[in-house]
Amino acid sequence: MIPGDIARGLPSGDQIKIQGGCIKDTDEQTVADVVTRIEALRLSQSAFDWSSVTSVDFLSFLSRQSSELSIVLKEFGTILLRAYYIDSRVRDAVGVGRRPPFPLGYAMPENDLYALEPVYDRGLIYREIEH
């Protein structure tokens, strides 16, 4: 059975095209900092080879380095989420339409976490992969 969000056209992250306006000038430096920090840690520990690393190995490496990378990964995650949720297909699928959420779009009360209930209620929607 196909989960409702996917049936409504919610694209996966690898289908999103980075659109003008969702990446700030400072974001490029943040992404460069994340890549530089990950590469320095990888080299210092001879952790893996890029040509043969699996997603499980890479995520395990990131998990082990969480204290070293937590701040830059949080900033990087914010950039990725902004890029994902600015895509018109995603906004249509979650029911907010194509107009911008701010400053001239939707007005939301501050700290209104009830808007996230559909996201929590849908449960997990990722797909398992074999390694």
Image (cartoon, rainbow, N blue to C red):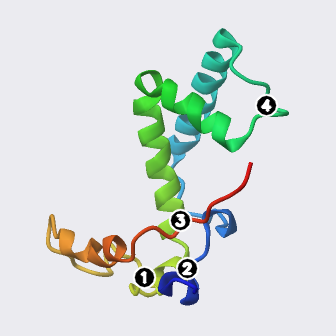
Residue 50 - label: 4
Q: Is residue 121 left or right of residue 66?
A: left
- The three-letter amino acid code for the residue at tag 2 is Leu
Q: Position of residue 17 (x, y in %)?
A: 67, 66
N-terminal-most mark, 2 or 4: 2
Q: Residue at x 71, y 14 (%)?
A: 46
Q: Residue at x 33, y 81 (%)?
A: 105
Q: Establish if 15 lies above or below 56.
A: below
Say if mark 2 contacts mark 3, CB within 8 Å: no
Q: Is residue 78 left or right of residue 54?
A: left
Secondary structure beneath label 2: loop
N-terminal-most mark, 2 or 3: 2
Q: Which residue is mark 1?
A: 94
How crowded pointer 4 is (Cα within 10 Å; few <14, some 14-19, many 20+) is rated as few
Q: Is residue 97 left or right of residue 50?
A: left
Q: Which residue is mark 3?
A: 84
